[in-house]
Image (tube, rainbow, N blue to C red):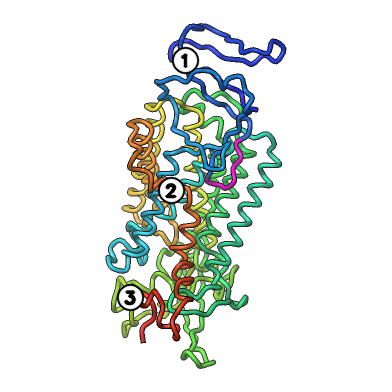
Amino acid sequence: MGSYQLIREKKDARLRWDPQQGDVIVEGEGKNLSPRIEVITSDATSNNDLELSFQKSPTSPLSTLPKSSGDHGGPHFRKSKSGGSARLLSLDIFRGTTVALMIFVEYAGGIYPAINHSPWDGITLADFVMPFFLFIVGVSLALAYKNMPCRLTATGKAIHRALKLLILGLFLQGGYFHGIKNLTYGVDVERIRWMGILQRIAISFLLAAMCEIWLKGDNKVNSGQSLLKRYHQQWAMAIMVTALYLSLFYGLYVPDWEYQMPMGISSSEAKIFTVKCGVRGDSGPACNAVGMIDRKILGIQHVYARAIYGRSKECSVNSPNYGPLPLDAPSWCQAPFDPEGLLSSLMAIVTCFIGLHYGHIIVHFKDHKVRIQQWLVPSSCLVLLGVTCDCLGMHANKVLYSFSYMCITAGSAGFLFTAVYMMVDVWGYRHWTTILKWMGTNALLIYILVSCNILPVLLQGFYWRRPENNILTMIGVGPKK
């Protein structure tokens, strides 16, 4: 059963339930002040990694206490439909905004290439989606693991959720579905894609969750410095992960390598392409350590076949869209490259750690002004650091998940989250948020149906006489003869 703390603006006072007297005891000064009750839960587990739950005994004597009309000291929570749980409204709206952005760039990116994913260096609107989701996962973990009755139980649940995301990611992005314009399905396990968006989120979630469960102190937090001290082990982990990424990226030697491409659709013969490298610390498409590690560990046949750099000027006459190869195209243009590779996922984990810090600020600071200040300072520092690194040659690159890219996108996520928090929790603008709130609470379902093309695949499965005569063809999406 949760405990309850009485919060007063000027004088300290607490309510304590005395089981022997069977009554509520008021301790401290200011007993005559009107109280505001904050629920301090003893269990904050949830049904998914993005949900914050509270448990409260229905027989609690505090259920009859009056509510304060001037409660503005904490975030706005709303009850879930399942009952007995609550969700942070600001976080749901931020998640819903990210889902809306994902849908927009998914379908408008082909029409307006400027907002589509950058073919290599640089950041576009679409490149903010993945870091925003990772940032949200971090914030959610800080709230979900605010109080834990049992660390072992929380660890088991976190591992279980991560495994579910991994399996779902393999099913959706491993090649089992062949996308729109193709009614076939199934994947050769010798060519299955091991990494993907959900797999990256699962890995980041699991490591961040383990750190949140096991690596945090118990000192009292009353300032930004004491907050850093309480979670110094987590920051040490984030620094070590960053150092590992940078040392591998700039220290590993990338030798020459080769890959094969079929001569034709029905041909069993393949043409061998050789890519000349022999360098260290290269950040170009052909000779970077990110791609080399994936080829060595996963196998080149298990990485994403349609590389994003296929839209670059070197590899497409229709750049920034995919198109025929130029006559002087380099040998690496058709080589596979996974945008969610192993090494690049290290910096994705750091984005989760940054989200954890923003969630810790919600947990330990109750004043709006303090929270906003604690958010804006690291957001500004991250963006400034990222832009500086980009100008000095460490270019922002989504595919490599470079250090500068991580800083810019994580800082931008902090700014957007702060803006949403101010609108929803400080200024109280909540009526316009209904759709975003719904999208935020159903983010995974929307991602599966829309971004993974499951909904179009299901719709095109119903056709009249010929597969070409389906709903997608009628609206100009399906295959054309």
Look at 47% across and 53% down and name the residue there. 443
Element type at mark 3: loop
Q: Earlier in the sequence, mark 3 or mark 1?
A: 1
Task: Kindly identify which residue carries mark 1.
Answer: 8
Give the mark toward the camera: 2 or 1: 2
Residue depicted at 51% across the width and 47% down the height: 137
**Which is more toward the observer, 274 or 39?**
39
Can you give x and y, in whole percent of width and height, for residue 168 in the image? 58, 62
Tag 1 or tag 2, which sits nearer the N-term? 1
The answer to which of marks 2 and 3 sits earlier in the sequence is 2
Number of numbered markers: 3
- Magenta residues span 44-50
Res 46 visible: yes
Q: State the separation of the CA atoms marked 2 and 1.
A: 34 Å
The answer to which quarter of the image holds residue 342 is bottom right
Q: Which image quarter holds the C terminus? A: bottom left
User: Given contact means CB atoms under 8 Å apart, are the residues at marks 3 and 1 in contact?
Assistant: no
User: Which disc, if any, is residue 389?
Assistant: none
Residue 315 rendering spot, x and y as whole percentages: 35, 77
Comparing 261 with 328, the one in front is: 261
**Mark drawn on residue 438:** 2
Residue at x 68%, y 34% (from the top left corner): 149
Q: Is residue 47 magenta?
A: yes
**Pointers 2 and 1 in contact (C-beta within 8 Å):** no
In this figure, which residue is indicated by the disc labeled 3?
476
Quadrant that contains the N terminus: top right
Regarding residue 278, the answer to whether it shows in the image is no
Residue drawn at x 67%, y 44% as measured from the top left: 155
The answer to whether 235 is drawn above or below residue 249 in the figure is: above
Element at label 1? loop
Amino acid type at image mark 1: Arg
